[in-house]
Amino acid sequence: MSDLQAAKQAVLDYYQQLDSPYADIEETLSQHCADSYIWRGFHPFGELFDPKQVAQKFWRPLKQSLKALQRRQDIFFAGRNRIQDGEANWVVSMGHLMGLFDAPFLGIPPTGKIAMLRYCEFHRVKSGKIVETAMYFDLPHLMAQAGVTLFANQTAAQLVQPGPATHDGLLYGPVPEQDGKDTLALINRMISDLGQWDSELSLEDELRQTWAEDMLWWGPTGIGATYTIPRYALQHSGPFRAAFSDRSKTTHIARLAEGNFGGFFGWPNFSARLTGDFMGLPATNDIGEFRVIDIYRREGDKLAENWIFIDLLHFWKCQGFDFLAQLQNGAEA
């Protein structure tokens, strides 16, 4: 078995045990994660540095709120991290965590109905253990299912987001290495083309260099999902660029690809100054951090789909809008 296949199996074994309704959560994480485990999660969790902390602060409360929790994976792949000269093996899982929303979670009121939490995880695996995880999830998406609307002026669509149109995102077995190289080269070219907002082309033509005309952009709640290059430019990219200035360079902790799928994450990916109105909220003129996961599907020589996880609660908290605290205070009142 190759080292990438072994890394995949280590994560699948972890999921099989963690997702069991009978799992001892602390024991599961202690068994599958290194003692020096690093876990990065969206606000309000931040960085945790011990498997038991992750079990007690994230997984146990989540499972107590979303009963009969079920992992519904849409994408699963592995690769060598090109940010670290290909030395580290990472495994990526993306989909929804589905359960019966029977108890409050972080002040979000339960519905007694099915709820689906969008998630994406990057796991670095070494010697059969998970040593580092980025666990990004869309809490405003869960809030919307519970009838809590944080952002009233969403420019694109709110919906439970599907997996790849091709239904081939679960790469449990090995795939030709060249396919992943081609995907990563296209992602790198897209980052170079779009990353600094300094092209002399129109926004639509700039996008057409690396994106399919019928691209699908599955954005986070507060921004939403959009379809086709012109509508993406109108409903997200154009308003986003108009709202920000002083954008920093892009930095990632991991960037990898396998087959037609690839992605990256940073902590943060970049920062920018909010100099215009954004998501229905006013300019602050303050610098904000963007913690992001992007997952891509390549089709031929263009990017066809993109799933995005942005820690909007963290971004807005740094701008002086603590929406989660407001929700929790309202629930306690």
Image (cartoon, rainbow, N blue to C red):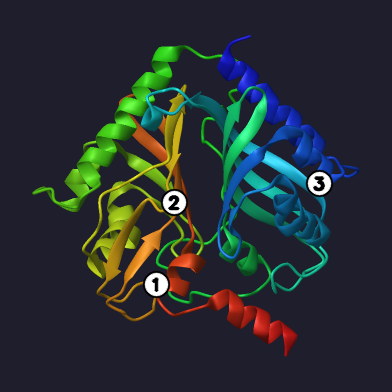
Q: Quadrant of residue 65?
A: bottom right
Q: Which amino acid is tagged 1?
A: Met
- Residue to which mark 3 is pinned: 26
Which residue is more in the foreground, 61 or 240? 61
Horizontally, residue 97 falls left or right of residue 103, namely left
Sequence-wise, which precedes: disc 2 or disc 1?
A: 2
Q: Residue at x 63, y 22 (%)?
A: 127
Q: Residues within 10 Å of mark 3 (few under 14, many from 20)?
A: some
Give the SS element for disc 1: loop
Mark 2 and mark 3: Cα distance apart in space: 26 Å
Q: Tell me if I can see residue 1 in this picture.
A: yes
Give percent across and percent down for residue 81.
44, 29
Mark 3 and mark 1: Cα distance apart in space: 39 Å
Horizontally, residue 215 falls left or right of residue 307, namely left
Q: Residue at x 79, y 55 (%)?
A: 60
Above or below residue 284? Residue 79 is above
Determine contact: label 2, label 3, CB under 8 Å: no
Q: What is the quadrant of the C terminus in the image?
A: bottom right
- Residue to which mark 2 is pinned: 267
Sequence-wise, which precedes: disc 3 or disc 1?
A: 3
Which residue is more in the foreground, 154 or 76? 76
Q: Which residue appears farthest toward the left when viewing the image? A: 200
Q: Which amino acid is tagged 3?
A: Glu
Q: Residue at x 69, y 69 (%)?
A: 106
Give percent across and percent down for residue 302.
32, 31
Determine contact: label 2, label 1, CB under 8 Å: no
Determine contact: label 3, label 1, CB under 8 Å: no
Give the SS element for disc 3: helix
Above or below residue 99? Residue 307 is above
